[in-house]
Image (tube, grey):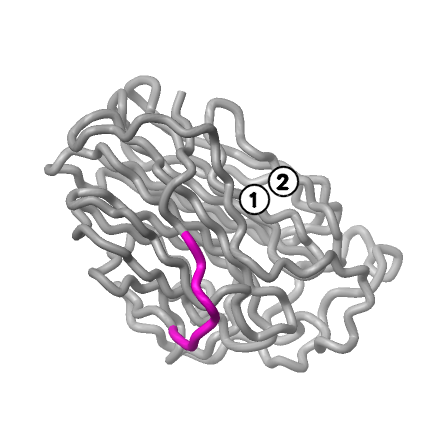
Amino acid sequence: MLALAALGCQSQAPQAGGGTPDGGTPVGDAARPADASSRPVDAASRPPDAAPTPIDAARPPVDARTDAALPPVDAATRFDAPPMADAPPGGTPTVVAATQIHQDWGVGSWSQSTISVTGVQAGDAIIVLGIYWDSASPSEVNGPSDSMGHLSVAVDQGPTYVVGGTLPVIAQIYYQLGSAAGTHVITPPGLGGGDGDGTLYVIHVRGLPPSASLVGTGLSHALGTALPSVAVKLTGSALPGDFVVAVGGEDNQVGFADAQVTHAPSAWQPIGVQDDGTNNVPSEASYRLAPSSGDQSVSWTWADPTANVTTAAIAAFR
């Protein structure tokens, strides 16, 4: 069983910034207009068999949202477990610290503009996961960035579902193996202003071997009506001890204050969770060491009754 150690990641005062995409050249039309209209203010206004909301009729303007908002969170949220000894380089992978920040719908900026990952030792790893409604234009679709090195793409659904003209709810997993020692400043992706929202999760990992590499990924994305869950499966087989991360979530047509996303899925360890379905995109991020050879999969459920789009991503490192 892995645990989170209360070291390292801290948030800095807001500053402008955005990431650089890794792979895929965006093409096509912009995602959705800021003044588009989608989510009714109560479930009664939406018939049970309503079709999925098209991209050209997205969410209502900011001032039309009448759902009760949750109290704002002004600082990055930490999810820490009791301290444990550092794993030596090349030993059992250990999550040293985990941090999450969010951008609420209608705000147009992140709760913190950057995340500082402190205490990084040479050879550590940094993994950045996220679930977003990305309102960026095709030329702006991007990923997170790191001040001390390149973040590589494991999974990025942006070029497909933001640029591709459907509901732009996307999952991302970016990573850096063999990090340089020092403080790494992570800048989240731009989400296209006030109509974009989502949550970014960052974990600092120690103990992956110097030869570690990305060995498998998987993703899912679905549209529907009253979707109750999402699942994702790793393509290919894992080996015992592979370090596996995953993130999944949903968005809805009617604001739902407490989505109650599974946290954490069975046999997985939590990174963080976002349950605010009124102001954000409900999501959850988790990790584990593969317990045996073979398929790796994970699923999430929620209480949100009007989920009409789901997304998830998974990646394994060895």
Q: Where residue 13 sits in the image (x, y, percent)? A: 46, 68
Q: Is residue 231 found left or right of 48 in the rendered image?
A: left
Where disc 2 sits, the SS reads: loop
Q: Do residues under tags 2 and 1 come within 8 Å of each other at their CB atoms?
A: yes
Crowd tier of the residue under label 2, counting other residues whose Cα lies within 10 Å: few below 14, some 14–19, many 20 or above? many
Residue 53: within the magenta?
no
Outermost residue, left side: 211
Which numbered disc covers residue 273? 1
Q: Which is nearer the N-term, disc 2 or disc 1?
A: 2
In space, the residues marked 2 and 1 are separated at their CA atoms by 7 Å
Q: Which residues are magenta?
A: 10-17
Q: Where residue 157 sits in the image (x, y, percent)? A: 41, 58
Q: Residue at x 47, y 75 (%)?
A: 136
Q: Where residue 309 sits in the image (x, y, percent)? A: 60, 54
Disc nearest the viewer among 2 and 1: 1
Q: Residue at x 46, y 44 (%)?
A: 247
Q: Residue at x 77, y 52 (%)?
A: 49
The residue tagged 2 is 261
Q: Residue at x 50, y 64 (%)?
A: 112
Q: Is residue 72 found left or right of 204 in the rendered image?
A: right
Q: Is residue 122 found left or right of 168 in the rendered image?
A: left
Quadrant location of the C terminus in the rendered image: top left
Q: Nearer the viewer, residue 114 or 167?
A: 114
Q: Quadrant of residue 108?
A: bottom right
